[in-house]
Image: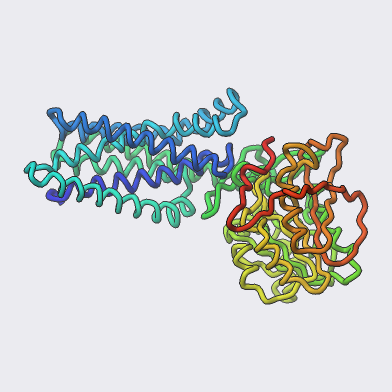
């Protein structure tokens, strides 16, 4: 271990850098979303900090006391990673008060929280190359070896963090764990026992464990309080696909429970036992427009379960009908069972016996690609805030949807957009795309306002059948309107900016 101690340090350090990058996106997502804006900010700032760290580390490597500097760098790295979960909420809330610009806010948050820790981790590579250098004739071999080990460590951290650590432990807890791991690298750096550094390491590890235990217990306590209706705080979960926040609130003087994923309202339920299967958000009632069809609607597919508000309403109000729900995140389904009365619905309506509600954990696009079942209607509610699931907006997906429908079946999708102006770009592009596949496409605003530039929920209904609906908006589609395809789907530049 003494012989390969520097290789161990650089391997673990670069693994931590990549885990920090993944954690950064989760820390920012409840405030700025999980779009390309956040990822661009995180990747750009961390690359910048690492490159500056490499440059400064090269200067430090040419000076004396290189081993002592290595230890100091590890100590500083541990301290700054330790501070992230302690100050992240206050820092981001302050940024939101200063600016409403999402791009600027995401960049500032990444700078203030992750720039310095990443910079210190970037110092390590040139210093370790210097420590491993015994002969100038092998400089290429040594630097190549260290860079290769660092890259492999980064790959290891990416898969470990993305597939296991973040969804299993959550971003806050991982930061304390990373602090402990960095602290454990300090004695490995020189294998020397020093009382001061040892006391510091032990104290920091104990504090990290205490804070991590406190965070776990506090999140669990708040979760129970939310279930009992006694809390105005929020509880959070990190799943494989995003940061989930749950809290109780008031809406039109009614007690409701909100499900928020990556800064977007995903679902809500009344906490009143008598109204737990009713619809909170007005737009979800728009899915009932499918019953305007001349055909009987019995078998329905819903893409995007989240809090399962419409499936609960559908199963409890239409007792002779069935629904398949495709939700990409199995953990979200478990959250819906616990916090949003999905398990109550399953028990009360004998779902396990009559199979009227089929819960499917799969990506909506993948399910449609492989589906052989025919539906009377397909509903799409796979949105995160204003952002739709890109892969479900393209003409290739619309063709697969049509293949999954019975003759004259209906496709209904919720589109958050203005009806006119700059913020109507996505609605026009999506309607134009759907028109390439279906004979008739109707736009029914869910809460039509006098201002057509206002961003609202719109139910877009597509079918080859001729159906009449009230309040249909005659959306003007120009000849040069964008058609969304798998090859060209600029959704991020089309969705409403406010």
| Farthest residue, direction top | 98
- Image-based side of 176 in relation to 322, left or right: left
Q: Quadrant of residue 254?
A: top right
**How many numbered badges does the structure rendering display?**
0
Q: How is the image coloured?
A: rainbow
On the image, the x and y values in percent for residue 448 come to 86, 42
- Location of residue 485 with respect to 74 vertically, above or below: below
Instruction: Say which residue appears at 12% left-offset and 50% top-offset.
Output: 3
- Image-based side of 251 in relation to 470, left or right: left
- Image-based side of 475 in relation to 16, left or right: right
Instruction: Say which residue appears at 65% left-offset and 47% top-offset.
Output: 387
In depth, the one of 58 and 29 nearer the eye is: 58
On the image, the x and y values in percent for residue 498 come to 69, 35
In depth, the one of 69 and 423 nearer the eye is: 423
Q: Quadrant of residue 135?
A: top left
- Location of residue 147 with respect to 391 vertically, above or below: above
Instruction: Say which residue appears at 73% left-offset and 39% top-offset.
Output: 423
Q: Quadrant of residue 416?
A: top right
- Image-based side of 255 in relation to 447, left or right: left
Residue 383 visible in image: yes
Instruction: Say which residue appears at 48% left-offset and 48% top-offset.
Output: 170
On the image, the x and y values in percent for residue 413 come to 75, 56
In depth, the one of 13 and 104 nearer the eye is: 104
On the image, the x and y values in percent for residue 102 come to 59, 33
Residue 274 visible in image: no
- Location of residue 350 with respect to 154 vertically, above or below: below
């Amino acid at each position: 271990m003494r012989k390969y101690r520097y290789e161990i340090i650089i391997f673990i350090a670069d693994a931590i850098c990549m885990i920090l990058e993944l954690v950064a996106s989760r820390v920012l997502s409840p405030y700025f979303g999980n779009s390309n804006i956040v990822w661009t900010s995180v990747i750009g700032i961390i690359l910048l900090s690492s490159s500056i760290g490499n440059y400064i580390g090269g200067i430090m490597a040419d000076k004396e006391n290189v081993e002592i500097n290595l230890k100091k760098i590890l100590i500083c790295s541990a301290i700054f990673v330790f501070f992230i979960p302690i100050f992240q909420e206050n820092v981001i809330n302050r940024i939101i008060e200063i600016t409403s610009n999402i791009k600027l806010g995401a960049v500032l948050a990444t700078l203030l929280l992750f720039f310095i820790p990443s910079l210190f981790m970037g110092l390590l590579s040139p210093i370790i190359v210097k420590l491993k250098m015994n002969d100038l004739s092998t400089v290429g071999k040594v630097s190549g070896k260290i860079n290769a080990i660092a890259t492999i460590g980064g790959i290891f951290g990416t898969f470990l963090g993305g597939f296991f650590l973040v969804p299993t432990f959550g971003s806050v807890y991982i930061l304390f764990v990373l602090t402990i791991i960095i602290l454990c690298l300090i004695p490995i750096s020189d294998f020397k026992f020093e009382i001061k550094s040892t006391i510091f390491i032990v104290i920091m590890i104990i504090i990290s464990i205490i804070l991590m235990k406190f965070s776990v217990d506090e999140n669990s306590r708040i979760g129970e309080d939310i279930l009992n209706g006694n809390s105005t705080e929020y509880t959070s979960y990190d799943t494989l696909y995003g940061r989930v926040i749950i809290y109780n609130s008031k809406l039109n003087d009614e007690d409701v429970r909100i499900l928020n994923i990556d800064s977007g309202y995903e679902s809500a339920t009344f906490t009143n036992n008598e109204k737990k299967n009713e619809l909170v958000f007005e737009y979800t009632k728009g899915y009932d427009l499918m019953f305007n069809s001349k055909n009987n609607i019995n078998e329905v597919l819903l893409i995007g379960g989240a809090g399962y508000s419409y499936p609960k309403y559908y199963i409890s109000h239409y007792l002779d009908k069935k629904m398949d729900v495709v939700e990409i995140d199995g953990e979200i389904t478990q959250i819906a069972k616990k916090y949003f009365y999905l398990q109550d619905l399953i028990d009360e309506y004998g779902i396990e016996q009559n199979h009227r509600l089929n819960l499917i954990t799969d990506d909506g696009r993948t399910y449609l690609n492989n589906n052989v079942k025919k539906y009377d209607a397909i509903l799409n509610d796979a949105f995160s805030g204003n952002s739709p699931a890109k892969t479900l907006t393209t003409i290739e997906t619309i063709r697969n949807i049509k293949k999954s429908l019975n003759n004259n079946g209906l496709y209904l999708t919720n589109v958050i957009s203005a009806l006119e102006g700059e913020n109507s770009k996505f609605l026009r592009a999506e309607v134009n795309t759907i028109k390439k596949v279906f004979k008739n496409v109707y736009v029914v605003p869910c809460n039509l306002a006098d201002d057509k530039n206002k961003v609202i929920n719109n139910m877009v209904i597509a079918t080859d059948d001729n159906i009449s609906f009230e309040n249909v908006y005659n959306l003007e589609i120009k000849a040069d309107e964008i058609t969304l395809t798998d090859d060209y789907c600029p959704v991020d530049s089309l969705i409403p900016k406010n």
